[in-house]
Every structure is written in C-alpha cells, then in structure tokens.
Amino acid sequence: MRYYLTTAIAYANNKPGLHTLYEVVGADAIARWHRMGGDEVRFLTGTDEFSVNIAARAAEEGLAPKAFVDRNVALFERSEGLLGIAPDRFIRTTDPDHQLAAQEMVRRSHAAGDIYLGTYEGWYCPNEGFRAEADVTKEGSETICPNHPGVPLQWLKERNWFFRLSAYAERLEAWLTQEPSPVQPEYRRNEMLGFIRQGLEDFSISREGATWGIPFPIREDGSSALNAAGEGDPKAGTIYVWYDALINYLTGAGFPADPQGKPWWPADLHIIGKDINRFHSVFWPAMLWSAGLEAPRRIWVHGWLLVGGERMSKSRGNFLDPDDAVRALGADGARFVALREVPFDRDAEVSWDSIIRRYNADLANDFGNLVNRSTTMAARAFGGEVPAPRPAAESPLAAAWALARAGAEGSMEGLLLHEWLGALWEFVGEANRFVDTERPWDLAKAAKEGDAAATAQLRGVLGDLLEACRLLALYAAPAMPESAVRVWNLLGHVWPYDAKGHGGPALSTLGAWGALAPAGPLGEPTPLFPRLDLEEKVTGDTPTR
C-alpha cells in the first residue's frame, strides 16, 4: 500500500526552532511506522522561499534572495539531519519542477473560469500574505499580523488575479462534514465550518511588481506571459506566496510531469499547525478541485508549543534550539521528549526544565533502567545465553503487552502520538513493577545454591523481561530509531529494517509476543540514556549532556 504524507513547509528566513521541527519529527515517526508496517511511503518536507519578507531580509544583509535562502535552508537540513529526520524528498519552492507545477495550477484554474482580474486593497503581512480586517491586531501604533508579532503590516492597493473561492462554499462544507471528516481533530474541522459559514471571499493569487517569486504565467489578455526559456514578463507579476506554497504537495507527488500526480496523489496525510488551517482546509481543496484534482484524504492540525502562555517563535525570542536539544538529549532523546511531552492535538507549555524532567523520568529512569537491569541480570545468570520468554498464556507481561500494543496501535492510527508513546510507557511501568514483584535477584541467589525450581523461574522471568525490552524497542522505534537498534543488538538480535524503516517483516508480525526465537549472545550492557542534572542543563545558552 502506498502512503504519502507531508508537513507544512517552513519559511527559510532564519534558523529553525524546535517548535518549527516538532511537526516534522512527528511526521517522520509516522512515516517510519508505515514503512515498518510494510507500506510504500513518500514523506515530504521542505522550505517556503518566496515571501516578500525574505527578499527584504536578504537585501538588509546585502545578499541576493537565492543566496539568503540557500544559507538558511542548509540550517534546516542540518538540524533535521541531527534529529534523524529522513524525508524521501526535501522540497524547496525554488526548485524548477515546483515552478512548473505552480504555473500549471494557475493555467488550469484560469481555464476553469476560477481566476479573474481585480483590485485588492487591504493589509499585507510580509511573512504570510493578505490579511482580513478582522484578522489583524494593534501593537502600539502598528497594525500587525497576530501570527508574526513585531512585523508591521503594509496597506496595499494592487491590481491582482483572484481565485474564485466563493464558488466552492457548498462543496467545501459537504467535504468537511463527511464522516470521518478529512480535517481532524474534530474541533479544528468545526472551526473551518464556522469560517465557511461566515461567507467566503475570493483571494488574491498574484503580486504586482514583485521580482522574487514564481513568474505569473498569464497576461491580462489571457496569453502566455512566459518566453521560450520560461522567463516571465515583469508586467504580469509573480504568483502569490501562499498559492505557490500549497502546491508543493503536488510537486512532491510528481505533478505536472504526471498530470494527476499518480501514484502518490491524493495525499494520505497533511500535517500542519493550527495557524494555517484555513489555507489547507479551505483554500487548498478548492484549488485542487478547480484544477480537476482530488482533495487530500486527511489533514491533521496540531497546536502550538507555548512558553509562559505565549506561542513559541523566533520573532518573540522564546524558542528552543533543536541543535541544543540534540546536544543535551541525543537525537532519540530529543525526538522522544518532543512527541511525549507535547500532545499532538493541542497546545502545550514546554520549557527546558520540563524537557529534562521528561527525559530523566521516562528514558533514563524507566526505559533505560529496565533494559540495563534486565540484560545485566540475564548476563550474570546465564552468561551470553538469551533465555526464552514463557508462552503468552503463562506470562503476566504477555497479557500486559497485548493491551499496550492495542493501545499504541490505536493511538498511532488516530495520530495521537503522545498517547502512542504513553501506552508503551505504561507497559514500561508494568515491566519495572514485574521486576520488583518477581525479585529476580532472590531467584538468582537461590539458583546459585542449586534450587532447580528457582533456576526455572529465573529463566522465565528474565526471558519475559528481555522479550518486553525487544517489543518496546520495536514499537518505539519510529520515535527513537537509533536506540531501538542498540537494544536489539544488545539482545543479540539483528535489526531487520534499514535506516528509514524499510525492508523488514511487517511490524505486526514482529510485534507478537515470542515472535522471534531467542538470539544471542547478549551484548555488553551500557546506559542507553545517561541521566541529566537539571542544574547542569545549560551552559550559557547551550544545554550540555
């Protein structure tokens, strides 16, 4: 089965913050889960590079816009690499095939009668585009976009091309009210229904006089504005940044080389932040229908990372550096904490203190300790031999795993990534309580004294614990892929998947209790997640491990 998922593309106007990459970490985990499940996956992320603000910032630094974004895109790719994010394509809106895709979408909607010339007058956010009067706020004497504090809005009057969004209100409402709705969680769907029922206005899809952007392909008389080399007529202007940006998902599917974007279109999942919901859940489906294409199957809208009740952002200066998080926690630690600490369906407060506490509690104390003491006790009791788990009907841990596995699978299907890991970590707790109840150290003492029954009991208890470690590492691998491999190697198993999660047996097959015969020999136990001290977490502005 093919599975195509995307994230929103980020403005390449600065280095990324952890809040920027949060949804990319989530999408990477979902992509890995589907690859391990046997699906053929295409995972797309990337950068949005044609905003007016980027051109202005580049000019301030004495750089050409392309040189400016090249530098910043390298920072995004570096941070994603440090976090172990493995997209199948990192798309840039400056890519040549994306220019062709955006221009083809304009032509199709023009041919459908959904694009017309008009005059726009109103507020314009250099970071986001045109804003309705009801969607702006005051900051002192300045009018600003609520999503970009500190960036004054411009009052513009331009002759632009408009997309006839108002013609799609009825179809959009019908699409949104399907069961299950393509826009989730449900309350985000309801927000969009409210927006539609207030009345939809047509929106501008071009900029007059702008030079940093994809050339608009049509002149006022309907003729092509592109020459034989694909260069545009400056009088025709450029494609508006939001219209261009949304089309990246089609470009990533192979459009327009394949007019329908097959085999990847329609997208199975768009993952986006709540501030851009209307662009994806209202504007984007209408654009696709106008071009004769299908709407995405599912749009998941997550919340914001908050600091002191305010949205985390680079412009506010309250953001966390993802590179610092990796230096402090390791790639897997940073990935795990982001997905476990922040609910994937709503806003959440985060801080370095909460991040370090979560890391210490869940990884250093609970999972890391479980793996370390299970493998250490097994090595002491049986040398390099890996004792087999007891049959599922005879093991209390097997019954607990069945519940945890069902909870994890259901939560992942529902895209509640925090609950997916929560279900697994409930089982971590069960396994640690099992150790305390069974007291294998007492069994080992009795076994050493020649007690055959204690020896058999010890073999079963440690076999169950090692199997619990195997299964936990397997099901948590999409969040912490490097650590999963380390645990399996420690248990004497060969990790069956490649670096992105391809190639092994289906996750459901390996996830059954006792699915693999005992391997061996056991590796040398080493701490997976060294504990961090809160008071040592920051040196200057950089946390240290």
Image (cartoon, grey):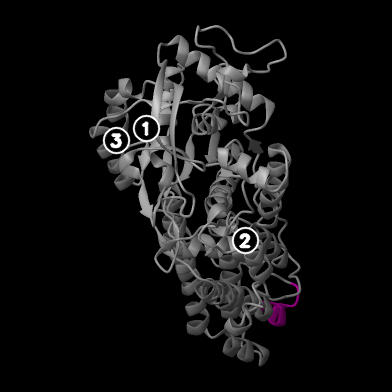
Q: Callout 3, which amino acid? A: Glu
Q: How many numbered dots are placed on residues in this image?
A: 3
Residue at 40% over, 47% down: 274
Q: Which residue is mark 3?
A: 179
Can residue 133 be seen here? The reply is: yes
Between residue 264 and residue 38, name the one nearer to us. 264
Q: Which residue is mark 2?
A: 322
Residue at 75% over, 70% down: 523
Q: Are marks 3 and 1 in contact (CB under 8 Å)?
A: no
Q: Position of residue 214 (x, y in %)?
A: 61, 26
Helix, strand, or loop for circle 3?
loop
Residue at 63% over, 31% down: 212
Up-down relation of residue 303 to residue 270 (above or below): below
Can residue 459 be seen here? The reply is: no
Magenta run includes residue 381: yes
Helix, strand, or loop for circle 1?
helix
Q: Which residue is mark 1?
A: 282
Magenta run includes residue 319: no
Q: Are marks 3 and 2 in contact (CB under 8 Å)?
A: no
Up-down relation of residue 126 to residue 344 (above or below): above
Magenta range is: 378-384
Give the quadrant of residue 166. top left
